[in-house]
Image (cartoon, helix red, strand yellow):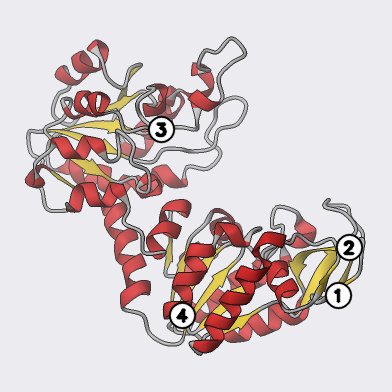
Amino acid sequence: MQLDYSGKKVLIRVDFNVPLDDEYNITDDTRMQKALPTLKHILEDGCSLIIMSHLGRPLKKKKDDGSIDVEKFTLRHLVPHLSELLGVEVKFCEETVGEKATEAVEKLEKGEVLLLENTRFNEGETNGDEELAKQMAALGDVYVNDAFGTAHRAHASTTQVAHHFAADEKEFGLLMEAEIKNAEKVLHDSERPLTAIVGGAKVSDKIGLLEKLIDFADNIIVGGGMAYTFMRAQGGKTGNSLVEEDKIDLAKELLEKADGKGVKIYLPEDSVVADKFAADAATHNADSDAIQDGYMGLDIGPKARAVFADVLTNSKTILWNGPMGVFEMEAFANGTKAVAQAVAQATEKGAFSLVGGGDSVAAVNQLGLADEVSYVSTGGGAMLEFLEGKELPGIKAIRG
């Protein structure tokens, strides 16, 4: 970060979209913790800080009478914990923009922090309304974007607002800088062999990423429900496993393209199969291309775990996006856990590892391995689109 914030009012967009329990207690403050270095760095310069964030999707989850459920989605619930983290009493404004917001900002003294209300309470936020962005911009002298998780959205508070600041009045926060730096390392400055692990339910969710990976990876490990579409593409019998029938031909094309470029695609040799999609299902191991009718693959099996671990521990660069099975059910979490442990082991041997995507991140966090991989991304969809080679509007708005 290069700007001098001394004596200025700094408008910053962060990602405080944290999970809350039924009593509105924060159950995971990772996103708030990740923003702290930037917030503290700015405050050290001697300025006043105005924080914007969204929380959930309030306009898509209105009450029966059509009104916004303010109590469920208000950022007011975050104030006590944020005050504790920053060591400063954080003030709160029940508006994002408007007379109350303007007045609250005008009263801010040097060293004080103001948290504005949920940006998504405003109808124009998600469609990038210019007037809303203009009102947001009027609150600060400079603008900082540290919300990588929403950088792929052209929202008013993440993209349009930046257009109202000159090039020397806006920049990325430390978290955004780190996210971009680590993703670009994988894309443009990676040691070989480079292994990408791609999991999740559907091929359709990862088409862009898979096509991009075939252009620059050495190995691609495919797990999760999407593996069975590839199995069918190879003529395998997949029982009741999730298969996207309309993506079988695409899977064949991806396999052929990879083969033509010398990229090795690893599919799970065996699977943990179940008679129903439930935590208490009857399970056994089966070859992934010979799953009997009435059973579905819900995790990779022991043979696949061993093969995948061997590939990973001999890699120099690793990108991981997506689980190997139905990770939220303990009976089908072993594949994801095994991959997480192998990624950590490879990192200990000197590999660079980037983990992105909700379940992948959850796995390394739950296993206490977050500090044993090189970088854990805060942005699932944003990281996915960045790695696909797309230009993210939140990044372009700062870089120009």
Which of marks 3 and 4 precedes in the sequence? 3
Task: Pick the residue in front: 373 or 200.
Answer: 200
Q: Residue at x 37, y 22 (%)?
A: 122
Task: Pick the residue in front: 116 or 48.
Answer: 116
Which of marks 4 and 1 precedes in the sequence? 4
Q: Which residue is mark 4?
A: 217
Q: Is residue 200 left or right of residue 331?
A: left
Q: Which residue is mark 3?
A: 54
Q: Residue at x 73, y 62 (%)?
A: 243
Q: Secondary structure at mark 4?
A: loop
Residue 168 visible from this viewpoint: yes
The amino acid beneath tag 3 is His
Residue 4 visible from this viewpoint: no
Mark on residue 295?
2
As measured in the structure, the alpha-carbon distance from the residue carrying label 4 to the one carrying label 3 is 35 Å
Query: Where, by quadrant of the figure, is residue 159 drawn?
Result: top left
Which of marks 2 and 4 precedes in the sequence? 4
Which of marks 3 and 2 precedes in the sequence? 3
The amino acid beneath tag 1 is Ala
Q: Secondary structure at mark 2?
A: loop
Picture coordinates of residue 162 (x, y %)? 20, 39
Mark on residue 286?
1
